Image: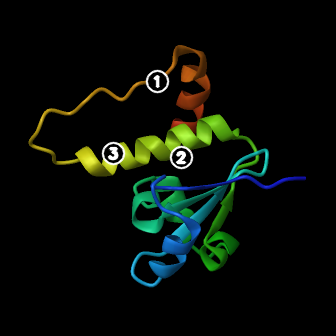
Amino acid sequence: TTTHVTIWPRNKTRSTMAESSDSQPYVKLVSASGHEIFLIRSIAMSSVTIKAMLEGPFAESQESKITFPDINTQILEKVVEYLHYKVRYTDSTTRIPDFVIEPEIALELLVAANYLDC
């Protein structure tokens, strides 16, 4: 099987991710199909569920890796996109753009967002 990797923000590469890991550690999120998404830890912590997993006495906190067996890649990527949006526009004094959600993924995204409390 092939493992697919996405690094958020998308403009980072594996080498820049490794170089910046001391100042801003990353968390690995794994979708149901095994797709790995590396996300800046401080952004991941804006999800109440992810924060609890990373701060609690769980294996996820030791490994900085969380597997979501019930969340597919498309939905997990959209959740990560929203977490970036949330962090960027929280307490913003400028006009906040709409967060676009495709109708065909809305229900599945709602279930994931509810579970992740984000």
What x and y, as percent, mark residue 85? Answer: 35, 43
Q: How is the image coloured?
A: rainbow
C-alpha gap between disc 2 and disc 3? 14 Å
Rendered image quadrant of residue 7: bottom right
Q: Is residue 56 above or below residue 32?
A: below
Q: Which mark is residue 86?
A: 3
What x and y, as percent, mark residue 38? Answer: 57, 61
Pointer 1 and pointer 2: residues touching (CB < 8 Å)? no
How many C-alpha atoms fall within 10 Å of the one at disc 2: few (<14), some, or many (≥20)? Answer: some
Q: Amino acid at mark 2?
A: Leu
User: For the residue labelled by badge 1, is the local secondary structure a helix, a strand or a loop?
Assistant: loop
C-alpha gap between disc 1 and disc 2? 17 Å
- Residue positioned 70% across, 38% down in the render: 72
Query: As rendered, which of 3 and 88 lies closer to the eye?
Result: 3
Give the foreground label among 2 and 3.
3
User: For the residue labelled by badge 3, is the local secondary structure a helix, a strand or a loop?
Assistant: helix
Q: Which residue is mark 2?
A: 116
Pointer 2 and pointer 3: residues touching (CB < 8 Å)? no
Give the foreground label among 1 and 2.
1
- Residue positioned 47% across, 59% down in the render: 44
Q: Which residue is mark 1?
A: 101
- The answer, for residue 64, to whether it is visible in the render is yes
